[in-house]
Amino acid sequence: MRTRALASEFLGTLLLVFFAVGCAVLGVNFIGTLGIALAFGFVLLALAYALGPISGCHVNPAVTLGMLCARRIDVATAIGYWIAQFVGGIAGAALLFLLAKQVPGIHTDGAFGSNGYGDRSAVHINTGGAFLAEVVLTFLLVFVVLGVTHRVAVVGFDGLPIGIALAVIHLIGIPLTGTSVNPARSLGPALFAGGSALSQLWLFIVAPLVGGLLAALVHHVTHPAGEERTIADEVAAA
């Protein structure tokens, strides 16, 4: 496993959390839901071009699980990516927390861009509804990633549909749960928000992983094996 691939997953997840979640924490009153949705999509799009050729720019444990189930990476690579992503998500949230504390009037307790359901949801969606929403939303993201890449790396115009998909996912998901579809994105902010953000965190880890697994299974039916390249092929071609 290449060290620079792990560094890319760490850095990419850090930047995704800092900038995209940062828009929700610091800029919601200025850019609204549409602005936040576009921020997530644009940041992922930019990272896909910058880091895609290095690590595939998963920056999301659910995407990595989808890649593992699609047999494009091995277990050791997946574990390394998961560790890098979770640590990167925490680091990005820590940097954002430090910045937020310098802004008068910004409250971080119980919120801080974390995800939630019940009274922590804008529409008060219940637990079952939140779980279903996160599964379906993550399914779309991972299915698009698997469908447009057919390989480990994101190259050419692959990043465009992925970024668009994430933006659309946030448009519907923000009112429901705040939109996770990414366990690493959820963990970091929840650690600094504390309280009910932590007690509800389990859903935003489990549901996206279920969505990623289902996407890989459906992708196996819609896109038969034969075109995918392994991580070894990617390394050899680099």
Image (cartoon, rainbow, N blue to C red):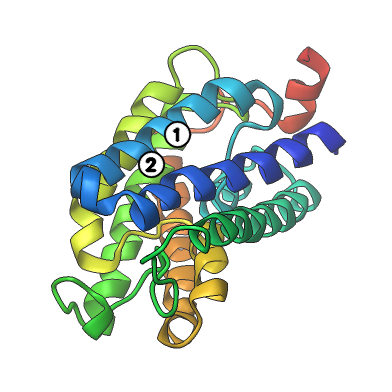
Q: Residues within 10 Å of mark 2 (few under 14, many from 20)?
A: many
Tell me the amino acid under the disc marked 1: Val
Image quadrant occupied by the N terminus? top right
Image quadrant occupied by the C terminus? top right
Query: Looking at this view, is 177 or 39 the one in front?
Result: 39
- Residue 222 seen anywhere in this rendered image of the structure: no
Q: Is residue 167 above or below residue 139?
A: above
Position of residue 145 measured from the top left corner of the image (x, y, whole percent): 45, 35
Residue plotted at (55% across, 68% down)? 187
Asked which secondary structure carries label 1, the reply is helix
Disc 1: which residue: 43
Q: Is residue 67 above or below residue 200?
A: above
Q: Is residue 89 left or right of residue 135?
A: right
Residue plotted at (33% across, 59% down)? 179
Position of residue 151 measured from the top left corner of the image (x, y, whole percent): 58, 27
Are the residues flagged by discs 1 and 2 in contact, CB closer than 8 Å?
yes
Rendered image quadrant of residue 119? bottom left
Q: Which mark is residue 40?
A: 2
Q: Residue furthest left?
A: 123
Q: Is residue 2 left or right of residue 85?
A: right
Asked which secondary structure carries label 2, the reply is helix
How far is disc 1 from disc 2 in space, using C-alphas?
A: 5 Å
